[in-house]
Image: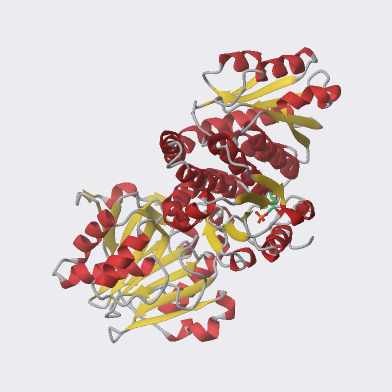
Amino acid sequence: MCGIIGVVQKNEKALGEKMGIIIRDSLKRLEYRGYDSVGYAIIDRNGRLVIRKAKGKIDDLLKRLEFERFDGLVGVGHTRWATHGPPSDLNAHPHTDCSRCIAIVHNGVIRNYQELRDELASRGHMISSDTDTELIAHLIEDYLREGFEMIDALRMIMRKIDGSYAFLVISCRETDKIYFAKKISPLIIGLGEGFNLISSDIPGLIKYSRKIIAIEDGELGYISPEKIYIENIYGERIDPLSRVKIIDWTIEQIERGGYPHYMLKEIYEQSIAVRNTLASVAEQIRDVINILLSDRDIFITGAGTSYHAALVMDYALKYYLGARSTAFISSEISLYKKIFDKKSVLIAISQSGETIDTLNALRTAKERGALIISLTNSVDSAISRESHYKLYIRAGPEIGVAATKTFTSQVTFLLYLVSELLREQDPDTGSLIKKELEESPELINRYIKKIDKESESLASILKDSRNIYVLGRDISLPVSMEGALKIKEISYIHAEAYPAGESKHGPIALVEKDFPVAFTSLGFEHNHVMVSNIEEMKARGAFIIAVAPYSDERIHRLADYSFLMPSMKTMAASILYVIPYQLLAYHLAVKRGFDPDKPRNLAKTVTVE
Ligand code: M6R
């Protein structure tokens, strides 16, 4: 996700460097978050708003962006990770209002983007970028023109915009303040003597301050060189000093948000990632709904984790809509080649958007006349560029090689799409899926620490195992497949997912005393026979692990180790039920002495066939 930094100082010596250099260095420390464009705005000593921004990496843009040239008392900087609109000079932040007096940088996704854009355009605003961020600058402009103070304008805008955001605003009319507002996306103030800073992330400000205040959801305010003002959306003041914390982490720890590994950070970030996915899915899928409801053959493809997300969608289409969809592994394209024609639609799923197998599958289907819809995390990737319709999960950059938050975001997006496809055929089920998806971020927050502890103690039991089976039926199977993939790629324990019912047709031959066999049951699928499958394994001495609803006593009674999961009624449960496996894989890797962020022989993006 985007990185933001704001600096305000009493005089040009307060921080010992030129404002441009301070911003450049802070942005460098936010680079690890992933980005495609850079920009900053400074109000110079003549009160002039200077803006420099471009697509590309900071080190390649040093000359063009002239960081060393500009000084001033207030400035904001931004590293953009594209969500609305492709990476480009124009879409890079900061964005301004029509009068170019207000500059804004933003991290997050505005859900009611289209509605706001139409409204602003109808009032004559010149909107020059494709971003959601620019709209906030124009909204501020309107309120200020009506005579409101900036703080009141921001409060009203927070009520008007829907989605996730942390944004900073500077104005040529108030050159000693940086205004801010936050919902979901992180925002942290760093306190100094004669200066203050504000950033999306501690690394952005750590060089100058270790005294921080974390801004909470629904809060807004401003920082000036000597003052911090915070209030909530109801206008109630908050005492900033009651929130001050001292940071004693190393820079490395800070970049991982205090987590020992990116993988763990990203597992914990899933509630935010799923929220961000939900914030933009409805607006994105409008055009593809009719295509998928028309009389077309639906194919879904991906590799690795993205294939498992494809399977979840395939199961959902069949189970809820009775659709004749086909999910296939993208490198297996040759098998399907002759089936594609003008009546086909292919949904190509890829976190990176660069996986060559998936790109090849897309090209093959396209050549034969199929319509291509892509679902990626990276904006403007090869896969999205070559698609007719480009959809984005907007989960934020994923640094760990193991896909975690991008899987749950892919599933969230795809199940939301299915819930919309059900609008005519079965609106009640559609609404129920949507409701459970909307509840998922909160459920993740509520359960994740408990699951983490339980996974860690299970990892202590299993760390010397050589094999693990992960079994499931129906929708529990893709979840089990994703669980097994996580375990094998990170901990190097051979983990095999299998349909539970099929296990007695071969895999059971390997089972002997203490052989670990995990059973996934989301609770609502046809799992009544799962109990017999567990009994069969138990009779051979297997060590049974259950990931099942807490209410499913039959399963938990048979298990040697249980994850008591919340009871859910729809396939949205696959989001929560994969987490025990992600955390088990993580703890197994750590206990076995491996680096979970960099598994051997694997790359984050696979661009070879
Ligand atoms: O970027 P993509 O989603 O296309 O990547 C596909 C696979 O390479 C990827 O999911 C891989 O299997 C991960 N290491 C899984 O954790």
Q: Could you tell me which residue is drawn at 43 percent across and 59 percent down?
A: 200
| Closer to us: 489 or 127 | 127
User: Does residue 105 appear left or right of residue 137 in this picture?
Assistant: right
Q: Dividing the picture into quarters, in which one does residue 145 lie?
A: bottom left
From the top left corner, tell me how far across and down residue 77 is, in percent: 43, 71
In the picture shown, does residue 523 fall above or below 182?
above
Residue occupying image coordinates x 75% and y 52%: 336
| Residue 288 in sight | yes
Write the residue at 80% across / 15% down. Answer: 540
Where is residue 35? Give x, y as percent. 54, 66
Between 582 and 7, the residue placed more toward the observer is 582
Q: In this view, does 133 lie above or below 249?
A: below
Front in this rendered view, residue 5 or 334: 334
Foreground residue among 262 and 133: 133
From the viewer's perspective, tell me whether residue 119 is left or right of residue 342: left
Q: How many marks?
A: 0
Q: Is residue 228 left or right of residue 40?
A: left
